[in-house]
Amino acid sequence: MTRTYSAASTFLIALLALALPGCDAPSGGDKDESGVDDSAGSDTYVAPTDADGDGITVGDGDCDDTNAALYPGRGEDCDGIDNNCNGVVDEGLADTDSDGTADCMDLEECDGVDNDGDAEIDEGYADADADGIADCVGTEICDGLDNNADGRVDEGYDADGDGATQCGSATVVADCDDANADIGPGSGETAGDLIDNDCDGVVDEGAWAAGDLAISELMNNPAQVGDPDGEWFEVYNTTSRTLILNGLVISSSVDGDEHMVASDELVLVAPGDFFVFGGNDDPSVNGDVPVGYVWENISLSNETDELVLTADGIMIDTVTWDDGRTMPDTDGASIGADLGTYSAILNDDPTLWCVATQRWSTDPTADLGSPFAENEYCSTYDHDGDGYNADQGDCDEEDATTYPGAWEGTDPADNDCDGVDETAPVANASATTTGYSCDDIYLSSAGSYDIESAPLTYIWELTSAPATSSKTTADIDTSTSANPVFNPDEDGTYVFTLTVNDGGTDSAPTSVSVSITTRSTNSAPVADAGADQSYGATSTCSAVAYTTTYTCDDCDSYTYTLSGAGSTDADADDLTYAWSIISGGTYATLSSATGESTTLTVSGVPATYGSTDTETVQVNMLATDCMGAMTPDVVQVTYTCTGS
């Protein structure tokens, strides 16, 4: 058996060797130190024992001779035992909490200290608020949680004793005035006191209505500065009362951004005034925009988005833009509702929005827009309702009497937008008539004039007539005359309109109305188709060789002029005429069947050698007055053709 000795054992053995130099037995027998000779008796020395076989006896310092793992000089194990018999347990091992118990043997206590040296504090103990601090050592803080696990939340943070703490949580509204027991979650809102009595972020709720605010302008794509610092939008107070914007919810529906206006101070906008919300109120980085309130967690998309305003659960206004499909889309300029269309309804019409063209800052590089100020007129919108916008040449969008082609008027202004300040002539229309059907209406422009005494030209129009009338402007004799004549054909009202021109400008049209009734008496006209007419023509005939036969050319054609100008009417009625051939029409044709005069042409009459052929044509003319009375007259035309 091999035995291992410790340094201490070796040292003790050496001492014994020095103390017993005469280890060899003396020849005279053993003698103890007292001088008594015991050679005659037994040896009383007892050899040291090593019961656990660790090489160290009790006498050598083994503190437990029954355990071979315990002896002087060995290394200390972390087991709560004095392994090296020096009277100290687990010396030299880590003891993080310095309580005399090595970490390896220590147990975690709820004391805010890492007792067992595992880098965790109070592990295994309850932590109801999950703040990393065990409830047993936790201190209540104002966070809406039971930090110390005493069954109460935020105790000590209800200064006014109204049952609501100033802390709040994700699900519990905080007391917004913990010094006033009348203000807190659940308190009734007092109208008109400018206080958020129930701490919901909305001041004096109940007064909001849809359309109270209108989104009037927005900058979603700045160029001078980057997004979102340069983004902003403007609202207009459409009401007659000051609006409190605290509690207004701003949201961007496309990406789900949302922000409620919250401030220790009241955020107000006066009646008929503007207010600007923006992503940054530092002029040095936001493009010098005068922002009234800075939002959080809002971004205005450059392409397609919808900006929504709600308050007290009411949809106040919304505006949508669509990457240029209907709404304007630009870079470095705001888009704004047209001046005068600040309405939550009107601003839904994309045609009423346009791109800003003016800078709000004196900086020549600043973006374009008008935050906190009136927008520009949109050149694409007809503001005065005259049918023209600025892009179409309207030179005054606030005056409905000024537009391209407008009447110049008698003021020295450019009403027709031709670039010349001028005045228009004045037209005056009148009429003289018996008022009876068939009687002429005599129109007059007397009283028309031009301020500069320029010569006038005249345009008369028949602008209204009885439904059964067939008359038109073409029946005015003559429509460009200063004093034309018109003959009505039906009872009723006729309206004539006169416009005069001074060589550059038309007058305003002026009208005159004439009422016509049926005449009670009428005389039939006297028809006169004119005197009978005759004409003789000669044809050259040629003998056929070796015979007594001749061939003749047709006689030349001849045209007779027929006229009913000699016809009369006792009532001075205008007459109409109808012409027709009633006999002898084989070689005759009329040029027209109507009109005061017509022509009759006889042609193609064959000739006979040595004889005269006669063609007699009778033409009937029917003269009719405007009341329908008719009188016929026949004129006879004789045509002779002689072959020779």
Image (spheres, grey):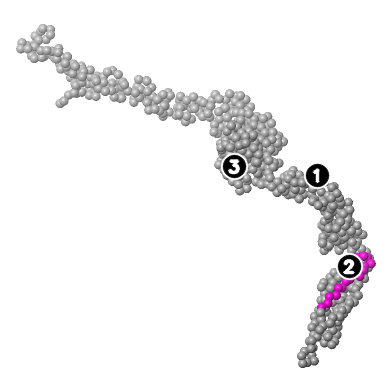
- Name the amino acid type tagged 2: Leu
The residue where tag 2 is placed is: 575
**Quarter placement of the C terminus:** bottom right
Main SS of residues in magenta:
loop
Check the image and report above or below for 240 versus 382: above
- Name the amino acid type tagged 1: Pro
Q: Give the residue displayed 24% in from the left and 24% down from the top.
A: 69
The residue where tag 3 is placed is: 331
Q: Give the residue displayed 16% in from the left and 16% down from the top.
A: 14
Q: Give the residue displayed 89% in from the left and 71% down from the top.
A: 564
Magenta segment range? 557-573
First along the sequence among labels 1 and 3:
3
Q: Which of 429 and 12 is in front in this view?
A: 429
In the displayed image of the protein, which residue is found farthest to the left?
27
Quadrant position of residue 616 = bottom right
Q: Nearer the viewer, residue 83 or 373?
A: 373
The residue where tag 1 is placed is: 412
Q: Where is residue 545 in the image (x, y as percent from the top left)?
A: 76, 90
